[in-house]
Image (cartoon, grey):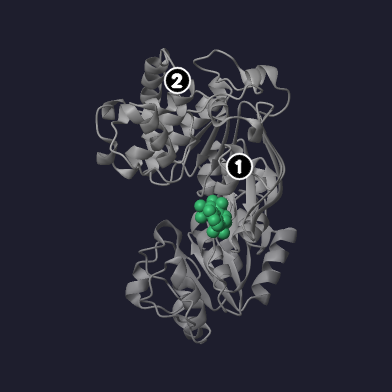
Amino acid sequence: MTPDLATDALDALGGLVGDDEDRPTDGTAATGNGATGADPTATAAGPLIEVEDLSLSYGDLSVLAEVSLSVESGEFVGLVGPNGAGKTTLLGAINGVLEPGSGRVRVGGERVADLSSRAASRLVATVPQDTTVAFDFSVEDIVEMGRTPYHRRFGGDPDAAAAVDRALERTETERFRDRSVASLSGGERQRVVLARALAQETPALVLDEPTASLDVNHQVRTLELVADLVDAEGKAALAAIHDLDLAARFCDRLAVLADGELLAVGPPAEVLTAETVGTAFDTDAAVLPNPVTGTPAVTPLPAPGELDLRVHVVGTGTAAARVVSTLVAAGATVTVGALPDGDVAAETARELAAEVVTAPAFGGLDGEPEAAARDCLAAADAVVVVDPLAPSLRALVRDQEPVVRVAADDAASAAAELGGGTADDRGRDRSPGPGTGRGAERDSATVDAAARATPETVALGVRRALDRPASADD
Ligand SMILES: Nc1ncnc2c1ncn2[C@@H]1O[C@H](COP(=O)(O)OP(=O)(O)OP(=O)(O)O)[C@@H](O)[C@H]1O
């Protein structure tokens, strides 16, 4: 491939043009850590990527305002924030494509603005958001473009073949090597562009939405790969990632950018709070630990409805948690309990600012917790019971009405047993409890028994039980 074509293609990929000569002033730090053997981190004190008081505007539009952020060697930082926050712009300032209005960007101790693009390209490799390629190159050619900053005027790049092989292998794109890049799917092309960045063998990697067009398996594998590279090779990686759960799972730290300013920077569990997510993304959200990974999982909540009621939920586990979040989203004031501390329904309720009564697990219900739960029941306009209940909780709600019942083991398909529901509906209730038998006497508690007991119908059920008209939120 001719240098001109390589340059054009790098432009098309949104990467740096890597074919001009080094400026004589830039010295040893402008050297990759792969083919050339030098390691900029060895000579540079401090973080590998260092952004200091960076401001940047497009004409009159101020996009970044005094942003300061650093990424250490061996660290993977996720840049999260809403559309238009300035993430791509910040990455562009770091890789030298955009010139800051004020402030400094250093990579490996070198001011990026002072480096030739060839020198900068040996320090920072970029995986751009847009991976469309203007010319129809083979995959191998595309990946080899990552070696452009190492091309010598005479003699080419002796390390290119090995670097390309390694990059193809690491991104599992070896089998596409001879294919035309235009024939690949968007997800396959994205992995090829990642391979190109790896072939560049830089100490710093910036990635703009590297998982945007990948399926769920490749999203995880790609971020795992970046995390591995960071761990094994001491790279510093900064990636704009829209999926907050994935960012929390794979990044060492997250930086939340909103409206051109950094709202928070730190470990995912500290940064991803309902408050920060709410401020950055302008939405209510529940943030709970992912039950599998333990990292924060963010669930945006619908705009609150207008269920102007106080509802007490009795039950445990994920079914009760879903009922709580549905009722909160419907606008109800929700209380929950008694239930063991640490139960997912208790954590969900706390996250959503609902009142929680806790009691020791496996014990009977008495004393203070019982009194607190009875206070909540007495204050409630309606009670939702998530079956099956422990005997102590069954006793607690025995005389309650109106009661909306939900079967925890199959909430989506079981019919609600709602006070005096039909015989058919009672027959589907899988646990004996206060709603069966006694329920037939409680006409006032009857809600449309044909309603399916999905959490969404619970809010509707409560409204009907109280003879309140449903709103559009149902
Ligand atoms: N070349 C440009 N000229 C003028 N305005 C621009 C230019 N590039 C970006 N902008 C504007 O700057 C702001 C920040 O854009 P940027 O692409 O950095 O945001 P982002 O956080 O990466 O967004 P997204 O998540 O949607 O990719 C946006 O308002 C955008 O319209």
Decide: few, some or many residues near mark 2? Use Cα within 10 Å; few <14, some 14-19, many ≥20: some
The residue where tag 2 is placed is 151
Cα separation between marks 1 and 2:
24 Å
* Residue 127 as seen in the image, left or right of residue 267: left
Q: Say whether disc 1 or disc 2 marks the residue closer to the N-terminus.
A: 1
Task: Reply above or below: 314 against 92.
Answer: below
Find residue 110 and report its image quarter. top right
Task: Reply above or below: 265 against 439.
Answer: above
Q: Residue at 61% across / 80% down in the picture?
A: 308
* Residue 129 on image: x %, y %: 45, 45
Q: In this rendering, does residue 392 appear at all?
A: no
Task: Reply above or below: 132 against 415.
Answer: above
Decide: few, some or many residues near mark 1? Use Cα within 10 Å; few <14, some 14-19, many ≥20: many
Q: Nearer the viewer, residue 219 or 457?
A: 219
The residue where tag 1 is placed is 93
Q: Residue at 61% across / 17% down in the picture?
A: 39
Q: Nearer the viewer, residue 92 or 335?
A: 92
Task: Reply above or below: 307 against 55.
Answer: below
Which amino acid type is shown beneath numbered disc 2?
Answer: His
Q: Mark number for residue 125?
A: none
* Residue 157 on image: x %, y %: 42, 16
* Residue 217 as seen in the image, left or right of residue 256: left
Which amino acid type is shown beneath numbered disc 1?
Answer: Ala
Q: Nearer the viewer, residue 366 or 298?
A: 298
Q: Element under label 1?
A: helix
Find residue 27 and report its image quarter. top right
Q: Nearer the viewer, residue 242 or 51?
A: 51
